[in-house]
Image (tube, helix red, strand yellow):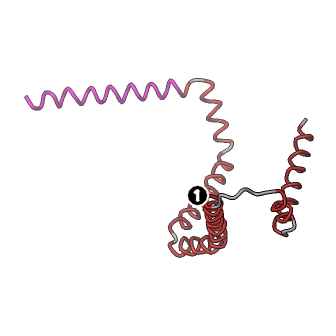
Amino acid sequence: MSQSPTQQEVPVTEGANERQSLDVLDQLMKPEVQESLTVLVENLPKLAEMVTAMTKAYDFAQSVATDKVLISDTMSAMGEFAKPVVDKAKGVASAAIEANDRAQAEQTSVGLFAMLKMLKDPNVQQTLRFAQSFLSILNERQQQQR
């Protein structure tokens, strides 16, 4: 009994292989498939060159991606590059927090004479010049877009 299913399975498999062979032959007989194969054969040298270049690029990328020393050096360089920026951002953030705390703590109002006194401060002047230039540039760009 165990041989009967095996004998039945073999012809089915052979029949399937024959059917697949016929399907492939039928596909190869189509004119558009033959034209495509002709184009592929004509371009094989170019395709081989492209595959070689892509293989070299893949090998290079793979070696770079798995090189522990290169990854470590790159991360170190990025950290050294970002450190001054991070330190500056932390300084500005802490100054903004401290300024907010001071502004919340003071309950006095800023009068006209206090504002005139602040206008003499070089930092205030620089900030006002920056704000004026910034708004002028934004206005010019808005005019150019119209």
In the image, residue 28 lies in the stretch drawn in magenta: no
Q: Is residue 61 left or right of residue 46?
A: left
Q: Position of residue 53 (x, y in %)?
A: 64, 57
Q: Position of residue 123 (x, y in %)?
A: 81, 68
Q: Is residue 136 above or below residue 91?
A: above
The N terminus - image quarter: top left
Q: Position of residue 33 (x, y in %)?
A: 60, 28
The 10 Å Cα crowd at callout 1, few under 14, some 14 to 19, many 20 or more, is few
Of the residues shown, which amino acid type is indicated by label 1?
Answer: Thr
What residue is rendered at 61% in x and 70% in y? 78
What residue is rendered at 41% in x and 28% in y? 20
Q: Is residue 99 left or right of residue 20?
A: right
Q: Is residue 19 above or below residue 111?
A: above
Quarter where residue 13 is shown: top left
Would you say the magenta stretch is mainly helix, strand or loop? helix
Q: Is residue 14 above or below residue 120?
A: above
Q: Position of residue 111 (x, y in %)?
A: 79, 57
Residue at image mark 1: 55
Q: Secondary structure at mark 1?
A: helix
Q: Is residue 117 above or below residue 33?
A: below
The C terminus - image quarter: top right
Stretch in magenta:
1-27
Q: Is residue 143 left or right of residue 33?
A: right
In the image, residue 8 lies in the stretch drawn in magenta: yes
